[in-house]
Structure formats: C-alpha cells, structure tokens
Amino acid sequence: MHGQKRAEYKARLLHPDTRAKLGSKAQQWNHLSEELLKQRRRLFSSPPPLSDIDTRGKANEGNAAAAAPSPEVLLALTEKMLSVNPDPSHLWNIRREMLVYLIQTAPPSAMNTTDDDQEGVDNDSSAKSSILDIEVELKLTAHCLQRNPKSYSAWFHRKWALVYFMNGSTSQQEHWTNMKSILQSELELCVQFLQLDERNFHCWNFRRFVVGLLGSSGGSDVTTTSENDGEVNNDDDEPTTTSAVDNFSGSWSAWMHQIEEEDKEVWMGPQISQNACRAVGMSTGSKDGSSDAIKSTTPLSKRELEKIIMNEWDFSTAKIQDNFSNGSAFHYRSKLLPLVLEFRSSGDSASSPSEAYEAISLARDEWDAILLDAIFTEPDDQTIWFYHRFIVTWARRNTVVVDGADAEVTEEFEGLLYDMVDSIQELIDVEKEDSFEGNTQDRHESKGAKCKWAYLGMHLVLSTLLEFKSNEVDDEDKIELRERTKECLDELMRIDPDRRERYQILESKLYR
C-alpha cells in the first residue's frame, strides 16, 4: 500500500511463481463462488423444514454439493470466502440474508426460552434462544479487518451485527450489562486499530457509532415493558420509551437528553438505515417485524453523559498529540467541542455572557495546549490550520450573546486573537529566516516557501479583529490592523500567485 514503489510491486506480480499462485487462488475462488450461488438457489427453491435447520452454524463444506440446502452451508462458504477477501459486498449481503433467515424461521418456543425452562430443550433450540451469535460475527469481521482495515463492507457488517443483537433481544438487565461490556471491548478494539493507523477514518467513524450505541443503552437501569399494560419497572419518574430501531442506529440524538435543544447540530446521525432495519424485522425477533415489546431505557444522567464525552475528548487529545496531521481526530474534536462547553458552562443558560466567556476560555485552552505546539512543529500542515480556522470561527460565534457582545467577553476574545497574532508572527519570522536566508523576493510556494498557511492563519485572525472594529472610527489601532492585513495579502500573492485574484478581492474589501 503506502511506501511501495510501483515498479517493484509490478515485478512481484509478474514473477512466474507469483502468477501461478494467483492463478490457482482465482480458480478456487471461482469454484467457491459458483457453489455459493448454487446453494442459495437450491435453498430458496426448496427451503428445508424447520427440524432440519442446524442453528449451531456447523456444516460439512466438503459435502456441500451433495448435502441438502441449508443456511449453515452458505454461512460456512461466506466465512471461508470473506476470510480470503473481505471486500465483496454481495458476500456480506448473502451472509446477513442467511442469519436473518435462521432467526425468522426459528420456532417461537425456542426464541422465547428462558434459563429456567432449559431442561428438556434440545441444543438446537437452546442455540436459537440467543437470537444472534454475536461473538461469531465479531470474530469474523475482526479477522477480515486485519486483512483489510479499510474494508467498507466489513465495517458495516460489524455495525449491523451489533445493532441486530441489541434490537433482537428481549432479555432483562443482564443482557444490557453484557451488551455494555461488548461495546467497551469495541472501543478497545478501536484503540488497537488506531495504533496501527491513526488516520483510518473507517475506524474513527465506527468509534462514533459504538459511542452512540453505548449512550443508547441507557443509564443505570434498563427495562422492558409490554405494549398492553404500558408499565415501566424502573425508578425514574419520567422514563424515555422509544422504539428499538430509533434507539440503536448509532445516532447520538437518542440519548443527548441533557443538552440544550439548539445544540442538536453537533449530534451524530444514524449510521444504520432505519427503513432497512424494519425491513428485516430488526425491532424484534418476529417474522413480520411487529413490536411485541418496547425497550425502555433510563436516560443517561448528566454525570454519565459527561463521562462518555470527556473520555472521547481525552482520547482525541492523545491521538492528536501522537500525530498533529490526524485530520480524523481533529474532526471528531470539533464535534465534541460544543458538548464539552456544555459541561464546562455548569448549567448556565444558553447564549449567556457566562457561557460565552467559557467558550473563549475553551478556545484559549485549545490554542495553548494543542494548536500552538502543532503550528511550530508542522507549520506547513493544512490539518492544523483548518482546525485553527474552526476554533477562531467557533469562538467568534459564541461571543454574540442575547443583548449584544458583552464587553468583558469581547475583551477576552480580542486578547486571544492578539496572542495568536504575536505567535504566528514569530513563526513567520523563524520560517522566513530558515527557508530563504535573506532572499525576500523568491518566495513562490513551489520553491520551498513554508509560510503560506501561516499567512492565511494570520489573515484570518487580523480580519476577525477588524470585524470587531467595523463600527468604530478609524483610530490608530484600526489603521494598523488594516495595514498589517494588506501586507499579509501582498505576501500571499507572492507566495501563492495561482490565487492572486482571490487575494486581490480580499484586499479590496479592506477599504469598503
């Protein structure tokens, strides 16, 4: 993948021994593909009786062609093929089709069997009572992701298996305790994958999904209630009862009960289609998808919610410190930032001066603890400057309160911006001295100039300061800011002539 020369890679493929091995593998793959499709056609043309379905998932692959068609044969074939190549989405589709088939054709008595009446129930029925063998699916997808950590289909199937397992069970508290344990293990798996490739956006997306499921699992008490009596057996005065499909789709909106309504823009949406879930009866284990029970979850307390969010905040901090070029970590951090502000505001009303002041304080922490080190370490890394732009824009938006800009808040924000100007100017001076050795004219970006992104960051800060003074008379400070902004744009025209017209337009706006 990365770090390989194309010529060497082609040479290895053209070697006679390599070509012979690849040819043999291709023949085996084609044989398994034909066998898979043949078995699937046989299954749906003459489905086996319920008594012949082996829900333990064991099948004799060697006698697959001669054996009666069964879902287990197809599951075994898909597992073998996906272990070699995890990318074909149609193989995962067939596997999910077989899993749903097994669940929907299981006898109701086996589906509803409890631990107390297991005596006299055969092993097949006992296996059906687990709804879905989540461990098998997690083990398979983990193996596939080791072969290809960026397989879209493997990551999706892992999400699907987790959601189906959560939605399909009607167990009581012990199920949710076990489910939370599984989700915590998934977070640990994400840590391992991100140690190998900290910028794997598939894994970052999956981590957000797992956090969504973890939050949707509820707080200290989770119960199940019947639709007929509508009673909920928990200690919360106002339990939140929603359909399972809406709860367990990876969306953050199902459990952000403690956040103000206007902050919903920061919530992560569902990653599993709700229509697709209902189409396979995911809300329960019934064939028609009808809901015999409604899962009621006690909303997370603010303390529990804060623990989840701050754990993710600390994790993103650690990954950024490991690599300042980690755009996925910066993106995740930008989504968490408004939520962290909510907890730091300590219950202040929305858009209050106190909350705005806390937003500026949080922005300063980001500048001092993250951005300042990053821009001096990697001054030409776009990722850092994109996050810097986000921080300035986000903090600027939070300085506007109900009755206009509070003087103390505005003063604090301007102080932060002036600190940024001083630090960025120091960076520019150091980079210019090291890169050009006194040559002030040869500054084209293609000839080694490292200051382009620093100048863009400087322009952002200076133009933001000018916005605060837009209604003021042209005093000495405002005139100096305008001149420094013009000098910054002139320098950008020399460094980045391909965008000269853009900088000229920005410069013309200075005197309007």
Image: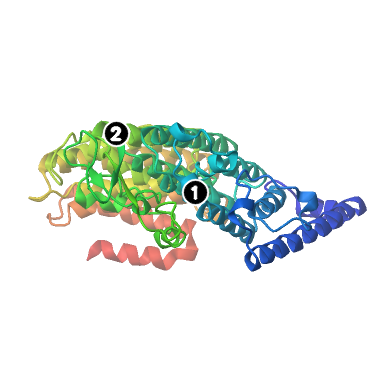
Depth check, front residue: 204 or 155: 155
Dot placed on the residue nearer the N-terminal end, 1 or 2: 1
Residue flagged by tag 1: what amino acid is it?
Lys
Q: Is residue 70 above or below residue 376?
A: below
Q: Residue at x 16, y 50 (%)?
A: 400
The coloring applied to the image is rainbow
Depth check, front residue: 237 or 412: 237
Asked which secondary structure carries label 1, the reply is helix
Asked which secondary structure carries label 2, the reply is loop
Q: Which of the image's four quarters has the C terminus?
A: bottom left
In the displayed structure, does residue 64 sit left or right of residue 454? Answer: right
Real-space Cα distance between discs 1 and 2?
Answer: 24 Å
**Taking the image as drawn, is residue 480 in sight?**
no
Q: CB under 8 Å between callouts 1 and 2?
A: no
Q: Residue at x 65, y 68 (%)?
A: 45
Toward the right, the furthest residue is 16
Q: Residues within 10 Å of mark 2 (few under 14, many from 20)?
A: some
Q: Residue at x 90, y 54 (%)?
A: 20
Q: Position of residue 297 (x, y in %)?
A: 29, 41
Q: Which residue is mark 2?
A: 221
Q: Position of residue 71 (x, y in %)?
A: 64, 55
In the displayed structure, does residue 478 sit left or right of residue 443? Answer: left
Name the image quarter holding residue 170: top left
**Taking the image as drawn, is residue 264 in sight?**
yes
Depth check, front residue: 33 or 266: 33
Q: Position of residue 391 (x, y in %)?
A: 32, 45
Q: Residues within 10 Å of mark 1 (few under 14, many from 20)?
A: many
Q: Residue at x 72, y 57 (%)?
A: 68
Q: Is residue 192 above or below residue 78?
A: above
Q: Which residue is mark 1?
A: 159
